[in-house]
Image: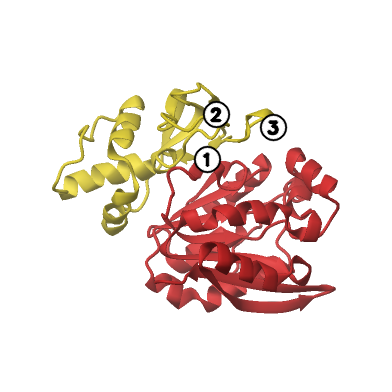
Chain colours: A red, B yellow
């Protein structure tokens, strides 16, 4: 049993501005723990989390893979989230390297086919499109959940770049819910990028039916 | 903290800025040294994903001249230790990174690089 990262250093102010781990986060941790031996066996060198928020998920995978074996890059559009991620890393003795940016944009040039693990718990809640725009531009806590049409507007932008980032043995984990149309995502990623998808965890949380998807290359 | 391993992976992403946009030049940087556990296997294995000349140059910009300008064919233990220090123990706390092509300035504050762009700069 891998302990959940200690987040006791986060303040009430932090929690007003940065997503506090909830059901979806814990399902994500469970899925990673379930895959722990496989993930370790691949000896990943670069792990990239998009929208790292509090840093809980990266600190957790860091405790699976070890603090010195892997580089943990963490992006978030919310500068305050980057700061929380950084502090969570220090507090849990896993060096997390935060970058405040949109998705993986400043890393795309240099990380072509280089990332062994990509983690993304996106803003997946279906909302009006205007809401996702203002949430992303506002760079605050609403950016952590407002997902626009089908809850997919931010995720779809990232899905276009995933295949280019993934290394040969790379794995991409994505949190989704029923409203995101999981079958459509799977079919599209296979058709457009030859990435195969497994549902590695599923749980009902209130009205949401959450899934953790894992994508990898077909021709490994 | 912006470690030099991270700096080696960041490029300018302003709309239309697609060549000569790496490595970002370091400007007015303050650094802090923090000891990290040495893992020679990690340092050896990560090297193919990094660009040596950019790394040696960035190290020189922060006052570390321990890496030769060209990547040597053979890695000995001393060199791996120097690499470990350059990649993982030098932290940029304050300053900026400047695109060599379009001169866009990406600030580093409180150890965090801000790579966000204004709406009109996004490609």
- Does residue A49 appear to the left or right of A22 in the view shown? left
Contact check, label 2 and label 1, Cβ < 8 Å: yes
Report the disc number at residue B119: 3
Q: Which residue is mark 1?
A: A106
**Residue A125 visible in the displayed image:** no
Evaluate if marks 3 and 1 touch, with contact meaning CB atoms under 8 Å apart.
no
Looking at the rendered image, the quarter that the C terminus of chain B falls into is top right
**C-alpha gap between disc 2 and disc 1:** 11 Å
Residue A52 at x, y percent in the picture: 61, 53
Q: Which mark is residue B106?
A: 2
- Position in image of residue A132 (x %, y %): 79, 48
Q: Residues within 10 Å of mark 2 (few under 14, many from 20)?
A: many
A126 relative to B53, above or below: below
Chain name for mark 3: B
| Residue A83 image label | none
Element under label 1?
helix
* Disc 3 secondary structure class: helix
Same chain? Circles 2 and 1: no
Q: Are marks 2 and 3 in contact (CB under 8 Å)?
A: no
Q: Numbered disc 1: what chain?
A: A
Q: Earlier in the sequence, mark 2 or mark 3?
A: 2
């Amino acid at each position: 049993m891998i302990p959940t990262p200690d987040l006791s250093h986060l303040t009430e102010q932090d929690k007003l501005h940065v997503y506090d781990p909830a059901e979806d986060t814990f399902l994500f941790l469970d899925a990673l723990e379930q895959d722990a031996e496989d993930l370790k066996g691949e000896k990943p060198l670069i792990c990239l989390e998009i929208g790292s928020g509090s840093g809980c998920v990266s600190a957790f995978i860091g405790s699976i893979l070890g603090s010195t074996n892997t580089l943990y890059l963490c992006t978030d559009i919310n500068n305050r989230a980057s700061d929380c991620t950084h502090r969570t890393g220090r507090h849990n003795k896993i060096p997390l390297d935060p970058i405040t940016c949109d998705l993986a944009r400043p890393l795309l040039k240099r990380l072509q086919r280089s990332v062994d693990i990509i983690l993304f718990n996106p803003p997946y809640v279906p909302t009006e499109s205007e809401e996702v725009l203002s949430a992303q531009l506002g760079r605050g806590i609403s950016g952590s959940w407002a997902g626009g049409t089908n809850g997919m507007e931010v995720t779809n932008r990232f899905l276009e770049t995933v295949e280019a980032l993934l290394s040969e043995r790379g794995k991409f984990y994505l949190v989704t819910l029923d409203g995101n149309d999981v079958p459509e995502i799977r079919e599209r990623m296979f058709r457009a990028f030859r990435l195969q998808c497994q549902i590695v965890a599923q749980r009902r949380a209130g009205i949401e039916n959450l899934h953790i998807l894992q994508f990898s290359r077909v021709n490994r | 903290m912006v470690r030099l391993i991270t700096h080696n992976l960041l490029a300018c992403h302003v709309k239309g800025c697609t060549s000569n946009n790496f490595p970002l030049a370091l400007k007015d940087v303050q650094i802090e040294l923090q000891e990290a556990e040495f893992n020679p296997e990690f340092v050896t294995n990560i090297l193919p994903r990094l660009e040596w000349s950019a790394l040696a140059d960035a190290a020189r910009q922060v006052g570390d001249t321990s890496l030769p300008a060209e990547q040597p064919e053979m890695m000995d233990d001393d060199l791996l230790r120097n690499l470990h220090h350059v990649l993982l123990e030098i932290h940029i706390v304050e300053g900026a990174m400047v695109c060599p092509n379009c001169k866009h300035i990406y600030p580093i504050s409180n150890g965090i690089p801000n790579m966000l762009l204004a709406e009109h700069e996004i490609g």
